[in-house]
Amino acid sequence: MGYQTEFFNSLTHFSASQWSSLNTSATPFLSHTFLSLLENTGCVGDDTGWQPHHMAVFDGDTLIAVVPGYLKYDSYGEYVFDHGWANAYHQHGLAYYPKWVNAVPFTPVTGPRFLLHPDYDAEQLIHYIAQQMKSLLADAVSSAHVLFPFADTATQLAPQGFLRRYSVQFQWYNYHYQSFDDFLQALTSRKRKGIKKARNQLSQQGVTIERKTGQNISREDIAFFIRCYQATYLKRSGHTGYLNEAFFYQLAEKLSDQLLLVVASTAEGPCASSLLLFDGQALYGRYWGALQEINELHFECCYYQGIEFSIENKLQYFNPGTQGEHKLIRGFEPVYCTSSHYLFEPVFHQAVKDFLHRETHAIAGYFKQATDVLPYNDKAKQQLNVFTISSVGDDITTTRTEN
């Protein structure tokens, strides 16, 4: 193969049409628009801890692959937690940062991570990209990480020595429900009554909910959402969030057709808001904030409204965000997420491999426990897509069957 590999510090080196020719995913997060917004509004670059360092592969003058990548100077905004690895490096007098990550910043959503030319063999290209990562990045960073790729990508990276790590998220699946009440009928009586009671309590307190999409989302709506987002981040984390005002305003301007805004109000006016993105298959819960705390309001704005929207628009699934066992009792099923890691210091690479072997067994146990407490009734469970664990070693082998 006579391919050439280059790294670029900005998406401005790629035209939107070039990018789109490689990006076959419908998800908004891999679009040229979304990733460019992060750069153009200063959410990545400079002192953010995320320095764009995108890999591009050429066959002569033809761009045949792009791997969105970043030099990272901390581990914030990744949602694959490796602070322990960084501490171990530090304790042994080695620098863990910078490292290089192939990821969508601040977005723990599984999807394609290598954008490949459709006329080239994907497996061969991934093999080449993995080799280039190891040979071209080794002198500049401690390690290379591929975060939230599709499972088959992680499988193809494994023969190149990349270590696979597992985590668990919770997603809601649409089993051809016709309404929210239809979904509730699939739950056990106790869980169904609990959700109805929680939603009725909000109504009795005078809370109203409005959903907006596309051009119905005004600049004033976004301004209110930003107030909520920043206030909530400030209260919980001591800062106003990874994403700035310019990002949200431009997101609403450039990707309005893929935005869902949920606004909660009381008699005194708007009090909370959530901002979600969607494509033709799925809804993705991303951002939330509130100016006052009202019991159950977070679940209404971030989960139940999303479920209703997904049913009404016949979306296949709803990814509400990372972490949170509380999603289980609200009908969200556990799903595996993966990441792939290559550490250039051999001793640490082996140490992480040993650690991940132990962690993988713990993750499999956690997944099994989560599956056992799903709130669906016996009849509905016969219709669920069910993950069955067939083996656990360094990797977890599962089968997902539809009854």
Image: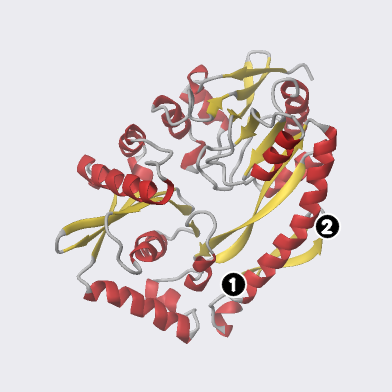
Disc 2 marks which amino acid? Gly
Quarter of the rendering occupied by the N terminus: top right
Quarter of the rendering occupied by the C terminus: bottom right
Q: Secondary structure at mark 1?
A: loop
3D distance between C-alphas at marks 1 and 2 = 26 Å
Q: Which disc, if any, is residue 190?
A: none
Q: Left or right: 375 with respect to 2?
A: left
Q: Picture coordinates of residue 25 (x, y %)?
A: 54, 41
Say whether disc 1 or disc 2 marks the residue closer to the N-terminus.
1
Who is closer to the viewer here, 50 or 321? 50
Q: Picture coordinates of residue 214 (x, y %)?
A: 30, 45
Q: Which disc, if any, is residue 393?
A: 2
Q: Picture coordinates of residue 356 (x, y %)?
A: 77, 51
Q: Picture coordinates of residue 321 (x, y %)?
A: 49, 54
Q: Left or right: 9 with respect to 131?
A: left
Coloring applied to the structure: secondary structure
- Regarding residue 371, the answer to whether it shows in the image is yes
Q: What residue is pinned by disc 1?
A: 384
Q: Secondary structure at mark 2?
A: loop
Q: Residues within 10 Å of mark 1 (few under 14, many from 20)?
A: some
| Front tag of 1 and 2 | 2
Who is closer to the viewer here, 386 or 26? 386
Residue found 42% across the figure and 60% down from its top: 310
Residue found 73% across the figure and 62% down from its top: 362
Who is closer to the viewer here, 166 or 84? 84
Residue found 73% across the figure and 35% down from its top: 89
